[in-house]
Structure formats: structure tokens, C-alpha cells
Amino acid sequence: MAIPRIQATNIKLLSTVHENFKQPIDNLFNIFNGDNPNVLGGYNETTKIIQQFLRDALQKKKSVRALGGNWSWTKVGFTKDWILSTTRLNRIKRTLPEEIEPSFGNFENDKLVFAQCGCSIQELNNVLRSLGRSLKTSGASNGQTIAGLISNCTHGSAIDVGSSPDYVVGLHIIVGPNKHVYIERASRPVVTNVFIQKIGAEHIRDDSIFNAALVSFGSFGFIHGVMIETEPLYLLNVFRKQMNGDTVRPLMQSLDFTNAPFLPRPNVRPFHFQVTINPYDTEKGYYVIVMYKEKYREDYPRIVTEINKAGPGEDAPIILGRITGLVPQITPLIVSTTIKSGYNEINNAWGTHGEVFTTTMLRGKILSTALGISIENTNKVMDIASRLNNEHSFVGVFSCRFVKQTLATLGFTKFPFTCVAEFDSFEAASTWRFYNALWKALDDEGIAYTFHWGKINNLDALKVKKMYGAKTDEWIAARSKLIPKEMIPVFTNEFMIQAGLVPAINA
Amino acid sequence: MKKTKLVSFGFCLLLVVYCVPLQSCSKYTVTTTQKDPADIYFKKKIAASYFWGIVNKPRTIIDTACGKTGLSEVKITSNVGYSLLHVVTLGIVHVVKVEWKCQKEPPVIGFQP
């Protein structure tokens, strides 16, 4: 019988999936579950070796970060010391009626599942589908782990659902060698003592700690398990159409669909709404994706992916970045050609959540910054970006995705309805010039915005404070309350110090 | 005329040298629709084939850590140096970089305990 183990890889330099930086580290460790067939029995064995790992880190004065799919563009989830790769921790516990508080509502099979931190979104999509269930939302792709997904407030564009932390109802966090806790909201208790006894954790019901821990980038301890609320399997009816800016822009700043006869289902509020803009055709180059949610049925036409189609190679971003740096005049041609080949019309396609938001094959040095803005400012920000594009020849596209407000204390989707304005591009000097100019322009114009924690940003303590105000202090206080004092340095990384998210600076 | 051609050629050469990253020339990836890697970094090995394929070193790349779930993705990279070596040696030496990630084991799911 195999027992859980942690293996040092002796990797000293780690890069992200997007290869946008390399971080020197002391060591990268892989953690493996044992083969105990009992789901929680094996899970609890893994809890113990994580505690032992934290004990070693404390003794050797090493900081620790658990790493998921390594999907982020920033150092928010990195540390210079020990990184623990969690991708192999993928147990999934189905809940039983006696484990769930009656006050949570009538028990439904698999409405709540307890996923180990390393479960990828793809795995969850597959498993939930087999159980007749689905995630409520996710990002555009499926490579993140569940703990990584929520820790950065990954969002999607399900306008009335919210972001990924908003369907999490419990967190099992290992905060030290001798303490692990299960946290949930006091205002919405979910699990009974029966469940708590099975994982052997201390039970905390506290809204402020829970909301703070949701988006905490690994700094509240090692998130070992996540209780997620699912919903019955559903289908998405997908459309993508090119439209004129004049037609779409009113929707982008209001999300009022009562006067939208031009959409595939006239005047119906969609489940998902997203707009991608060609910065070189701001009159007609609005590519609108709408999705309508329907009850699942077996007889829907499956999405067929063209796997033999030609497409950009892995080095395309860096080569195109250099060519456009040398000859900026060809940037509009490159962007427009890329959009034409990648944003073809989709008419009446159907798929489950997992089939629509599937594996991305994008590779190479791509960059992205994403700003959370209130929807009233959507067009204003897009106009500023267009104006700056005239000066900086941005090699990429503008996108807007929309979600309702998150309850997570430092969730960047903080406005009543947030437009996540994304600017995806290649690694190129013009990209950095454009990003810096855009961030400065928004500051100069006094437009309130936040940064996606996992995407390119220039966050520092002042900016974080400006963006989140008193919530920054609430978050720091919740962290100090939860984590044993001696463990604070273990779970503090360089990014947090830079962002002023440590008590010493804010005390 | 000759001078103009030489200048144009030189310019083109400079452009190519500037634009094409030396570390890579062509990369190709093999994966599956169920790609779900256990590894967060690519493991790498330089593989060489000598005398038009008579000898391979290593003969086969074997990853003993992947277990029963096998590989998630494999990437083959060649670069300008490798290509030059191939041409200069008339195919006697052929080098590629091979990178791969292991696939995750399927999740353990259940109600227990």
C-alpha cells in the first residue's frame, strides 16, 4: 500500500505556463496522495504529511507556496523558497445527508462536493458530468486547479453568477504543523460535525475570515480541500457574431438586454455575455459571444473541433512581437488576420459547461492584463484604450467579460457588476508600453479599477489600498486571526510585501 | 547593383537573426483532448540520432515517474544550431530537444468513509 509522499525535484528555476518570467527558487516539491481507497482516509493521510512539510519549513525558516496549474502571469502565487506542486491531489468526496446542515436546504445528491485542492477544472467538469452536475462557472479554459482558480478570483462571464469563489461554501486549510481548520460562513453554515469529525479539523464559522480566505493566493495557509456548490448539468446554447460598435456598446455599459432585438434571442438576458474588440476596427469589429442556459438533454449536436487546421506555432508570439516592434505598420494587418481566423461566426452551437470552456491550446509567450471596472465605465475605458492604441500599436485584442459582485474580500470583481476589461497580447515592447500607458491614463482620469491578481499588473501597497480601501485591513486582520503567529512568515511571499498585504506595514 | 543586392541580403539576414529566437526554430506538440498534466514544468532531454538513424542516444527516452497514466504532452524542438549541424554533417548527426509532462492519475471519487 502506497502512502502519501512529498518529493523534492531540485528544480531551482521555475516559470509559469505562459513563460513570462523565471523565478529562482530554493526547491520545487511534488506531493502525491497514497493509494488508500477510502476517499477521506487517504485525504487525511495527506493532511498529515503537509503538516510535516510545514513543520520542516518552519524549522528551516522557509516560506512556502502551494502551486496549482501555474496559470498566473504574476508572482502572486510564487515564493523564492519552497513551492509545493499540488496537481496530483485530486480526490473528490461526495457528500452524504448527515454531513450537511438541514438549514442548507433539501439535500440533493452531489449538490455539494468536497474537492481536494489539485483537482483541475477539467477533472471536475468530467466528474460532475458523470454525476449529472456542473460547475456554475469557471474561466475560459480548464487547466487551473480548483484552489488556484478561486485564490485569484478567476471569473468567466456568467453575468448573474459571479466569479469562481462565489460557489465555494467551505475551505479546509492547513495553517500550521498542529492546526488545520474548516472555515465556512456563519451566515450560511453548510457542514455538520459529522463531516468535521471525518477530516479532524477545527471548525470555524466566521463570515469575515471565510470571505477573506477565498481570494488569498495561498497566503492563508495550505488550502487542502474546497467544498463547492454545484448545479444540475445544463447546456449552453452558444452564438458568436460580428456586430457594429453602435449596436453593442449600450449593452456593455448597462447589461440591460430588454431592448436588444438584434441578439439571437431578442431581448432575452443571456447567461453569458462577452465582447471582443478589434482595436483596428472600432466601428464594426465587435465580436459578441452570447450563451443561453438550457436544461440538459442527451440529443444535442456535439461541438466538433477541427484538429487538423493550421494555427500559430509556439514561437509565433515572440516572433510576431519582434516583427511588429521593427515594423509597427503591419500590426493592424496581423491583428485583423488573427481575429478573422480565430473569431469565426458561431451559430447555435450546444455544449455542457465543460465542453464549451475546454482545453486551451494557446502556447508561448502571451501576455494579458485584466482590469475590473464598474460596467458604467466600460465604454469610457475602451475609448481610452483605442486612443492609446493609436500611439502604441497594441498587438492584441480588447475583451470585455461581465460578472456580478463577489463576496470575497479581495475579489477584484468588486463592483455591483464588474466589466473585466482584458488586453491580451504577445510579449512585445509595444505591449508593455501600451499597458503602462493604459494604467496611467486610468489613474489620471480618476477611473476606479482593480487588477486581476493573476494577470500582468503594477500593484504596490498604495494601489492596493486605493483599490480596496478598508477591505485591505479587514483581510489582513482575518489572516492574522487565522494563522498561528509563527506561521505568518512561512505563508508570506515577496508579492504580499510589495502589495502591502502584511501586518507590519499596515499596523 | 551587386552592392545593393549585398546590402539587401545583409538586411534580410539581420532581420531573420533579430526576429527568430535562437533557442528555437520549430516546435511541435503532441497531446490529447484530455490533456491534464501532473507536472507543472516540462522535463527535457536532448536526443541525438547518428549515422542516419543507425544509432540513437538515448535509444529511447523512458520516464519512470509517469506511472500507469502515461504522458500528457510531448514537445519536439529543433533550432538553427541543430539544423546547421544536420546539414553540415550531411545528416550524420541529427539532434532534437524532447520535452514532456506526465498525465495525472484519475481522481479517486466516493462517499467513504
Image: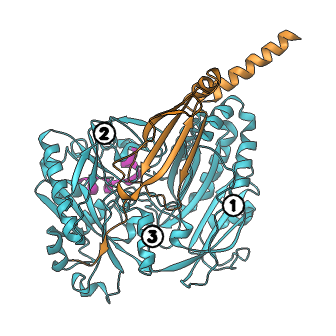
Chain colours: A cyan, B orange
Return the residue nearer the eye: A416 or A278: A278
Q: Which residue is mark 2?
A: A494
* Callout 3 secondary element: helix
Determine which quarter of the picture holds residue A125.
Answer: bottom left
Disc 3 target residue: A125
Disc 3 residue crowd, few under 14, some 14–19, many 20+, Cα 10 Å: many
Q: In which quadrant of the rendered view does residue A114 lie? A: bottom left
Q: Secondary structure at mark 2?
A: helix
Q: CA distance from mark 1 to mark 3?
A: 27 Å
For the residues marked 2 and 3, what is the alpha-carbon distance in whole angstroms? 34 Å
> Which residues make up the magenta segment?
A463-476
* Residue A469 among those drawn in magenta: yes
Q: State which quadrant residue A459 falls in.
A: top left
Residue A287: assigned label? 1
Amino acid on which the number 3 mark rests in the picture: Asn
> Residue at image x 74%, y 54%?
A340
Element type at marker 1? strand
Which amino acid type is shown beneath numbered disc 2? Glu
Please provide percent x and percent y for residue A99. Answer: 22, 81
Q: Output the chain of dot 1.
A: A
Circle 1 or circle 3, nearest the eye: 3
Return the residue found at the far front.
B54
Which of the two discs, 2 and 3, sits closer to the camera?
3
Q: Residues within 10 Å of mark 1 (few under 14, many from 20)?
A: many
